[in-house]
């Protein structure tokens, strides 16, 4: 089955909508921004860095976004 241009656009729009949904998943009215200075101090006391935690969180988020993109960009068979 050959995918039409309109079908392809629908797939890509759906992927963008999924990414947009992820971007709105943690609103600050429910998850207030933390005191990053305090978080840095507490993590340092436990032998971790805020940078390492931040990088891991970003890797996780981008891995999910990358999966959405790969699936949308996958050539139909």
Image: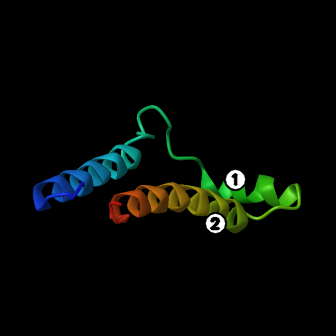
Q: What is the total number of numbered labels drawn onto the structure image?
A: 2
Residue furthest front as drawn: 1
Residue 65: image x %, image y %?
A: 45, 58
Q: On the rendered structure, is 13 left or right of 36?
A: left
Q: Identify the disc placed on residue 58.
A: none
Q: Which residue has dot 1 on it?
A: 39
Quadrant the C terminus occupies: bottom left
Name the spot of residue 26 as percent of width and height, x first: 45, 40
| Location of the N terminus (image quadrant) | bottom left
> Within 10 angstroms of label 2, few (less than 14), some, or many (20 or more) residues?
few
**Residue closer to the observer: 57 or 40:** 57
Q: Earlier in the sequence, mark 1 or mark 2?
A: 1
User: Residue 52 appears at what percent x and percent y?
Assistant: 72, 66
The residue sitting at 46% across, 31% down in the picture is 30
- Element at label 1: helix
What residue is rendered at 70% in x and 53% in y?
A: 39
Q: Which residue is mark 2?
A: 55
- Marks 1 and 2, how far apart in space? 15 Å
Q: Please give the name of the residue rendered at 58% of the width and 47% of the height, measured from the top-left corner.
A: 34
Could you say which quadrant of the image residue 70 lies in? bottom left
- The answer to whether the residue labelled 1 contacts the one labelled 2, judged by CB atoms less than 8 Å apart, is no
> What SS does tag 2 mark?
helix
* Residue at the far left in the pictured view: 6
Instruction: Return the residue found at the far top.
Output: 30
Picture coordinates of residue 21 (x, y %)? 34, 43
């Amino acid at each position: 089955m050959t995918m039409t241009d309109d079908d392809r656009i629908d797939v890509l729009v759906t992927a963008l909508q999924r990414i947009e949904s992820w971007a709105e998943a943690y609103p600050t009215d429910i998850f207030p921004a933390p005191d990053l200075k305090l978080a840095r101090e507490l993590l340092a006391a436990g032998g971790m860095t805020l940078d390492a935690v931040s990088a891991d969180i970003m890797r996780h988020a981008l891995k999910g976004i990358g999966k959405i993109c790969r699936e949308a960009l996958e050539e139909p068979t």
